[in-house]
Image: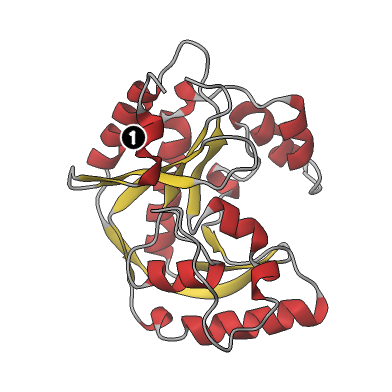
Amino acid sequence: MPLAYRYALYFAPPAPWREAGNAWLGRCPQTGAAIAPAAGADPRQPDWTRDPRRYGLHATLKPPFRLKAGTGVQGLDLAVRALAARTRPFEAFLRCCELRGFLAWCLADDAQAQASMRALAGQAVRSLDDWRAPPCAAELERRRKAPLGPEHEAMLRRWGYPYVFDQFVFHITLSNKLQGSQLEDAGRQIRLMSEPLLREPMPVSSVSLYVQPQAQAPFLVARHYGFDGTTADGAGAVYLDESG
């Protein structure tokens, strides 16, 4: 298995959040196809969404990692199947929010949904960690560009990511870090786009394995894992082949 591959366990929003979010970011991670901006869209939108477009519409559960020596992607696939099989579906309302300078969909103020999502993310971090290779020095330094307190630093060293467990905040990233009028303008457009979506609860009934075939390449959906035991492949399923 090529060392360049990175895998991540994400939550991929279902329809209609998926279609709206993909159209806003300008790419479908299920197929890898680009999506042209809607007629009349702000010409700055492709710049606002450059970074999240590469990762694809998602919320992070287990951050991107390379496979540890001695492990294989088929074992990772089985572990994700097991995680999905022991998880019960739930629903969550979303809200528009700003986090550390970028715009996102976050969970509404619902303690039960927040507890369920935190538990799912915690299980993902723990149960898949046997497949995670330690991050390299460059990856650690990139994480440290944002100031980290002692607890965040400890999480980074132990789990390869500073925002896990009690530091976890569910978010579906919708922009780069923005400032001033660009942050205000992008936020206004996201709220307008999101308004009909925030009226209904979003089902959480699956998790998804995404793959990055090489450094700086866009992430693709490899496989969706329903909590009912069903699976559905995306364009990145070819990277679940041990002989790749």
Find residue 178 and report its image quarter. bottom right
Position of 53 relative to 1 (above/below): below
Looking at this view, name the residue that lies furthest to the top: 70
Q: Residues within 10 Å of mark 1 (few under 14, many from 20)?
A: many
SS state under label 1:
helix
Residue 244 in sight: yes
Position of 208 relative to 129 (above/below): below
Q: Position of residue 118 (x, y in %)?
A: 45, 50
Find residue 191 and report its image quarter. bottom right
Nearer-the-camera pick, 4 or 154: 4
Q: Position of residue 244 (x, y in %)?
A: 42, 23
Which residue has dot 1 on it? 80
Which residue occupies 45% across, 53% down?
A: 32
Which residue occupies 29% across, 60% down?
A: 90
Residue 108 in sight: no
Position of 141 relative to 132 (above/below): below
Q: The disc labelled 1 sits on which kind of residue?
A: Val
Q: Position of residue 127 (x, y in %)?
A: 41, 30
Which residue occupies 63% across, 66% down?
A: 49
Which residue occupies 48% across, 80% down?
A: 194
Count of numbered labels shown in the rendering? 1
- Left or right position of 213 against 17: right
Q: Position of residue 94 (x, y in %)?
A: 45, 72
Q: How is the image coloured?
A: secondary structure
Nearer-the-camera pick, 178 or 43: 43
- Left or right position of 118 against 159: left
- Left or right position of 219 against 138: left
